[in-house]
Image (spheres, rainbow, N blue to C red):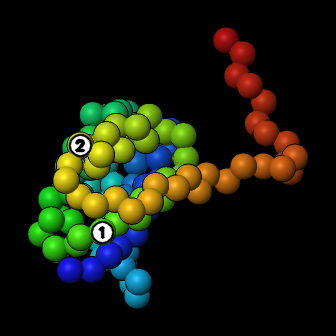
Amino acid sequence: MYKCELYIISTKNNTIVTLRNLENVVFCKSTGNLKFKGTKKSTPFAAQKLGEFVLNEIKKKNIEEINIKIKGFGPGREAILRVFSSESINIKEISDITPYPHNGCKPKKKRRV
């Protein structure tokens, strides 16, 4: 029916997915919304379940074509992409919008154990 953009924000603690069409946000979900709490939110399994939920919502709304934009380096990044690549939905573009510093702020110091 129409095309949308899917934003995946994958941090070390959570994975957040936002689906928006050209005008506004269609829906927004995270692994916390799917009753994963604490450290379980950051697992690839939680991201996989989130991907399956989002895929069902996309099919319900008759969305034919999506552009995927990924941000972050969290553990759910690859798991959620695997869900979308295995299905028969038309993915027009996958782009990485993770911000990279060009020698800006000094990074946090490494933890010594």
Q: CA distance from mark 1 to mark 2?
A: 15 Å
Q: Amino acid type of disc 2?
A: Ser
Left/right of residue 71 with respect to residue 1 in the rendered view: right
Q: Tag 2: Cα neighbours inside 10 Å, few (<14), some, or many (≥20)?
A: few
Residue 65 numbered mark, or none: 1
Residue 47 visible at all: no
Count of numbered circles on the image: 2
The quadrant of the rendering that contains the C terminus is top right
Q: Which residue is mark 2?
A: 86
The answer to which quarter of the image holds residue 19 is bottom left
Q: Which residue is at the far top?
A: 113
Along the line of sight, which residue is nearer the eye, 46 or 39? 46
Q: Which residue is at the far left?
A: 60
- Picture layout, residue 74 above or below residue 28: above
Along the line of sight, which residue is nearer the eye, 11 or 78? 78
Q: Name the residue rendered at 78%, 49% in the picture.
A: 101
- Picture layout, residue 46 above or below residue 90: above
Q: Name the residue rendered at 40%, 37% in the picture.
A: 78
Where does the image place residue 64, in percent across and percent down from the top left?
23, 70
